[in-house]
Image (cartoon, rainbow, N blue to C red):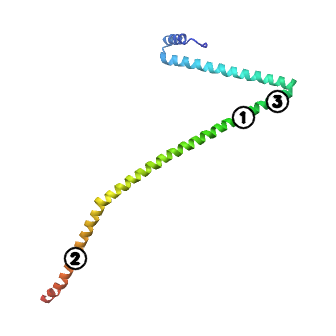
Amino acid sequence: MALYTDVPAATREARIFCADNQYRPDTVIYSVYCQLGRKAIKSKVILGVIAALVLLVILVVVAIFNAQALIDVLLILVALTSFAAFALLGYAAMQVVALVKEVRGEVTVLVGTAQETLTEVQGTVRFMSESVVHPATQAMARASYAMAWANATRATVKSFTEPLYKRRT
């Protein structure tokens, strides 16, 4: 299929192809669009390879006739590349510093929220202690005191009345 720059013409051709071969039109139209994109990418890659080869030929010719000029140009290119890399490294460092500051701010917010939650939990524990646990423990203590008094009273009564029962038998 030829490389189309006119999308309606490609769509029209795809619909005719569908009618002739009984394919779904949307599938074929999508396929035509994909083929158009792939061909455009392939043509750009081929163009890039040709440009790289031309540049390589120019560099070889310059190296044959004037090697010192080629070395100077390459040194300048390496220096510019290292300068650009250093600038990008500095930018990355500034981004890391900004990220650390942002994380510090978020951690401060999280610590504040955790302290608020801890305060609420302490209040809840205090409320439960005062309104449920403390009265329950007091009631259990009073019940145990009453049971102890009842046991002591029973033991005392038993100790006084037991000799009487032994005499009757």
Q: Residue at x 39, y 53 (%)?
A: 119
Residue farthest left in this picture: 168
| Residue 156: image location, x then y, percent | 20, 82
Disc 3: which residue: 72
Residue 168 sits above or below residue 154 on the image:
below
Q: Amino acid at mark 1?
A: Phe
| Residue 30: image location, x then y, percent | 52, 19
Q: Marks 2 and 3, how far apart in space?
A: 110 Å
Q: Are marks 2 and 1 in contact (CB under 8 Å)?
A: no
Task: Give whichever of discs 3 and 1 has the lower sequence position.
Answer: 3
Q: Amino acid at mark 2?
A: Asn
Front-most of residues 29 and 62: 62
Q: Residue at x 40, y 51 (%)?
A: 117
Q: Marks 3 and 1, how far apart in space?
A: 16 Å
Task: Give whichever of discs 2 and 3 has the lower sequence position.
Answer: 3
Give SS at disc 2. helix
Q: Is residue 72 left or right of residue 119?
A: right
Residue 52 sits above or below residue 125 on the image:
above
The label number, if any, that marks residue 16 in the structure image: none
Q: Quadrant of residue 41?
A: top right
Number of residues whose C-alpha sits closer than 10 Å to that of mark 1, classed few (under 14), some (14–19) or many (20 or more): few
Disc 2: which residue: 151
Q: Is residue 114 left or right of residue 133?
A: right
Front-most of residues 156 and 136: 136
Front-most of residues 132 and 147: 132
Q: Residue at x 44, y 50 (%)?
A: 114
| Residue 161: image location, x then y, percent | 16, 84
